[in-house]
Image (cartoon, coloured by chain):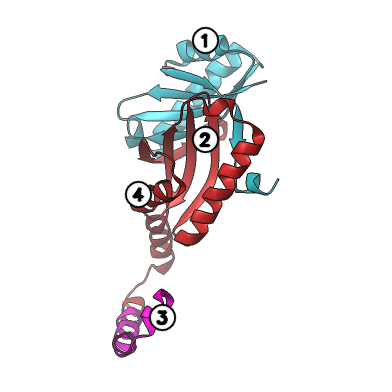
Chain colours: A red, B cyan
């Protein structure tokens, strides 16, 4: 059976009404749904900084980096909406990449499929800038 | 002016609340205005015990000067060669 059809199995169809019922009753007793929605969204996707150590990456040509970006984009598409690439800073021997992802495992899997290292993966607690002082 | 990534090791920085982050940003802004117009703070990612900061500056010396005045260490300073994003693949 193709992977996409797994949710339409007979068993899932039987369970579905029960899940919907439970969700509906949770919603009824929830007096602060807006707050919960925000919490849910934040817990779904976190921002991560990923360091990839690659010798002399800063000396790459624009064409090489374009090819690498293309490969990364195609793997992100394969992995689905749980992982998004924001941007990457290239320095002499390293990439500092900013990603949004549901969890670290998707970042590791992306790195494995693209064929690049993920030497450190750090969850971002906050993003601040000059405006934070205002 | 070149862009830089600065790694600052600051124990406990990820535990700051919004008010404390505001105070830290204010301290950094004050040091920036003392160092002059040839250094600009773009933004910073706070991770466990560390920040990764993006700055625009005419030299690394100004980044060191800002670190001294603000009290936030600049443990590593790296010049950015390129910035990539999903659109880079199409350009």
In the image, taking residue A29 as reference, residue A64 lies left or right, namely right
Q: Nearer the viewer, mark 1 or mark 2?
A: 1
Q: Pick the quarter of the image with the C terminus of chain B.
A: top right
**In this rendering, does residue B22 appear at all?**
yes
Residue A66, image x and y in percent?
62, 42
Q: Quadrant of residue A13?
A: bottom left
Whichever of labels 4 and 2 marks the residue nearer the N terminus, that label is 4
Task: Kindly identify the residue that appears in the image at 48 percent across and 22 percent down.
Answer: B27
Position of A87 compared to A109: left or right?
right
Q: Marks 4 and 1: in contact by CB < 8 Å?
A: no
Give the alpha-carbon distance from disc 3 to disc 4, as whole Å.
26 Å
**Viewport quadrant of the N terminus of chain B:** top right
Q: Residue at x 28, y 87 (%)?
A: A11
Position of residue A64 relative to residue A41, above or below, is above
Proximity of marks 4 and 2: CB atoms separated by less than 8 Å? no
Q: Secondary structure at mark 4?
A: helix
Q: Is residue A36 above or below residue B69?
A: below
Residue under label 4, please give it: A104
Give the magenta part as a residue range.
Answer: A1-25
Residue A132's mark? Answer: 2
> Which secondary structure lies at badge 3?
helix
Identify the residue shown where x is 29% and y is 81%: A22
């Amino acid at each position: 059976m193709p992977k996409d059809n797994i949710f339409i199995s007979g068993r899932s169809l039987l369970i579905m009404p029960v899940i919907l019922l439970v969700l509906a009753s949770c919603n009824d007793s929830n007096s602060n749904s807006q707050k919960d929605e925000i919490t849910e969204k934040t817990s779904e996707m976190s921002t991560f900084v990923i360091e990839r150590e690659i010798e002399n990456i800063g000396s790459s040509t624009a064409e090489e980096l374009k090819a690498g970006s293309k490969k990364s984009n195609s793997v992100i598409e394969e992995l689905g909406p749980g992982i998004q690439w924001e941007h990457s800073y290239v320095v002499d021997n390293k990439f500092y990449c900013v990603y949004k992802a549901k969890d670290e495992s998707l970042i590791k899997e992306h790195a494995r499929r693209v064929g690049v290292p993920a030497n450190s993966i750090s969850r971002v607690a906050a993003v601040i800038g000059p405006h934070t002082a205002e | 002016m070149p862009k830089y990534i600065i790694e600052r090791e600051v124990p406990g920085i990820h535990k700051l609340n919004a008010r404390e982050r505001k105070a830290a940003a204010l301290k950094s802004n004050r040091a920036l205005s003392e160092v002059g117009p040839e250094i600009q703070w773009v933004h910073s990612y706070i991770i466990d015990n560390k920040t990764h900061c993006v700055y625009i500056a005419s030299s690394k010396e100004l980044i060191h000067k800002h670190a001294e005045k603000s009290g936030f260490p600049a443990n590593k300073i790296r010049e950015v060669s390129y910035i990539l994003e999903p659109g880079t693949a199409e350009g």
